[in-house]
Amino acid sequence: MSNRSGWESILDEDEVIRWQGRPDGAVVWKVSNIGGLLFGAAFAGFALFWMIMAAQAGGGFWMFGLLHFSVGIGIAIGPVFWSALRRRKSWYTLTNKRAIIATDMPTKGRVLRTYPITKDTMLEIVSGDPASITFASDQRHRKNGSYKVKIGFERINDAKQVYALMRDIQKEAA
């Protein structure tokens, strides 16, 4: 695939598009979501209990618990649905030089991130249905430390073929 229409200002003159695709946008529950789910459910459950008790006292004071209940629900299921939304608003491109991830999120707008594919790029295919390919990482900082976030083409149907293309790009770069 080498159609450059609309890519003139983004691609180098000798750069060729090898593959384009989109991730699967399905809602996926992971084991890593269990902690947030349990904490959020407990938070929302306590808020619900508090609202019931406050409602029995009469008046509208119970409505102050709605904020806490909503936050608990957001903590419990928010990350799962946010991840699916992020994938639905993403587009992937692989050229003979780099991987490109474009997103158009309601909160951030349009963002285009590029990641060079060199002979030293660590490629990893992550099994799943559909599989993912990681090729970069980002260091995120918190108050009490930092953690790494893997970056790649998430949940793509033709992951094995794209992985083979990326290995070919690495061989060409060597």
Image (cartoon, rainbow, N blue to C red):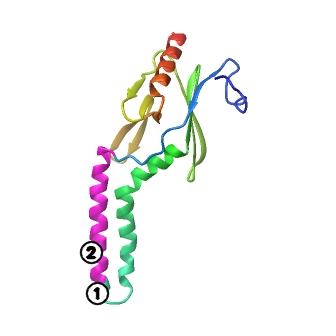
- In percent of width and height, residue 9 lies at 72, 30
Q: Please identify the residue farthest to the bottom as the structure is shown.
A: 58
- The mark that comes first in sequence, 2 or 1, is 2
Q: Can see residue 82?
A: yes
Q: Residues within 10 Å of mark 1 (few under 14, many from 20)?
A: few
Res 70 quadrant in image: bottom left
Mark 2 vs mark 1, CA separation in Å: 11 Å
Residue range highlighted in magenta: 30-54
Res 11 quadrant in image: top right
Tell me: 91 left or right of 27: right
Contact (Cβ within 8 Å) of mark 2 with mark 1: no
User: Quarter holding the N terminus?
Assistant: top right
Secondary structure at numbered mark 1: helix
- The kind of residue tagged 1 is Gln
- In percent of width and height, residue 47 lies at 31, 71
Tell me: 19 left or right of 60: right
- Write down the residue under mark 2: 49
- Write down the residue under mark 1: 56
- The kind of residue tagged 2 is Phe
Up the image or down, 88 lies above or below 9; here it is below
Up the image or down, 159 lies above or below 90; here it is above
Q: Considering depth in this image, is 6 or 67 the residue closer to the camera? A: 6
